[in-house]
Image (spheres, rainbow, N blue to C red):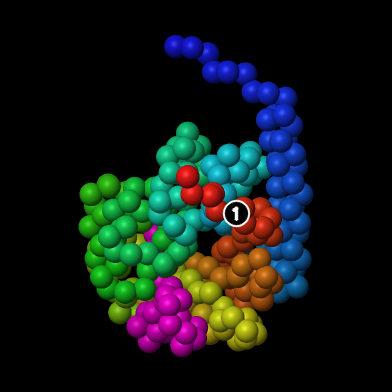
Amino acid sequence: MRPAPEESREVREAREARRAFLAGRLAAVRERIADAARAAGRDHTGITLITVTKTWPAEDVRLLAGLGVRDVGENQDQQASAKAAACADLAPALSWHFIGQLQSNKAPSVARYADMVHSVDRASLVSALGKAAQRAERDLRCLIQVSLDAAAGRGGAHPDEVPRIAALIAGLPRLTVAGVMAVAPPQEPAGPAFALLRRVRERLLGEHPGAVVMSAGMSGDLEAAIAAGATHVRVGSAVLGHRPPAPLPH
């Protein structure tokens, strides 16, 4: 086999510049999390930062892993599956979180790489994930996405539907009810919405003691989520910067 071509100085310098950029922004986000936890009287070590790498290349995932990131989030299966394959050598230190709306026909692919799915919101998806996880021989932690407003197209189950969906998840051998997830309604204060999510999780814990995860809060509202009890926050642009433009068609 031919040896891999040596990288140019420009490539090395660009990688180091990107690494320094990510390191600075990651440190700032971690400080925000620690400050928010302190203000809420919580231990910041009980809050997991999921760095959302959607639209960014696998190289960024590698740089982030080198900076201590252990949880990454993706919202599109095609991108996520390719990145997970490209970074397979980082397993098991790296956990993949699928955070986007998920079509049932994508469940077989997602079940092959995801460790946690944050967007389980209907019976048909539970069934598809259960079958896919069995075929993949992988255990899958499921968060029930809860709708905190009446907006269509955002995904999520009505709070009253959560117990039924949880029972379906718990009835399948490869799936685990891990908790709840939500996105705060736009143009509204996040605090009351996250407080509702916390109440939904507290009710869920009565039947499913292991459902401790509350996935809430993003770059703009992570402080409100932590104040409400979030255990996982999903942060993209505050770490990685503005989204890169989509590639031009050939």
Callout 1, which amino acid?
A: Pro
Asked if residue 184 is positioned above or below residue 238 in the image, the reply reads: below
The magenta segment: 141-162
Work out whether residue 216 or residue 10 is closer to the camera in this orientation and state it.
Answer: 10
| Apparent side of residue 82 relative to residue 11 in the rendered image (left or right) | left
Residue 191 visible (yes or no): yes
Image quadrant holding the N terminus, namely top left
- Would you place residue 229 above or below residue 62 in this image? below
**To which residue does mark 1 refer?**
245
Where is residue 25? Give x, y as percent: 74, 53
- Residue 233 in picture, x, y percent from top left: 59, 64
Position of 1 compared to 107: left or right? right
Residue shown at the point (39%, 79%) measured from the top left: 157
- Any magenta on residue 154? yes
Looking at the image, is 122 positioned above or below residue 45? below
Mark 1 secondary-structure assignment: loop
Number of numbered tags placed on the structure image: 1
Residue 193: % across, % down: 57, 83
The answer to which of 153 and 47 lies nearer the viewer is 153
Pick the front one: 184 or 192: 184
Residue that appears at 47% across and 45% down: 250
In the rendered image, residue 119 lying in the magenta stretch gets the answer no
User: Looking at the picture, how far across and down is residue 82, in whole percent?
Assistant: 43, 44
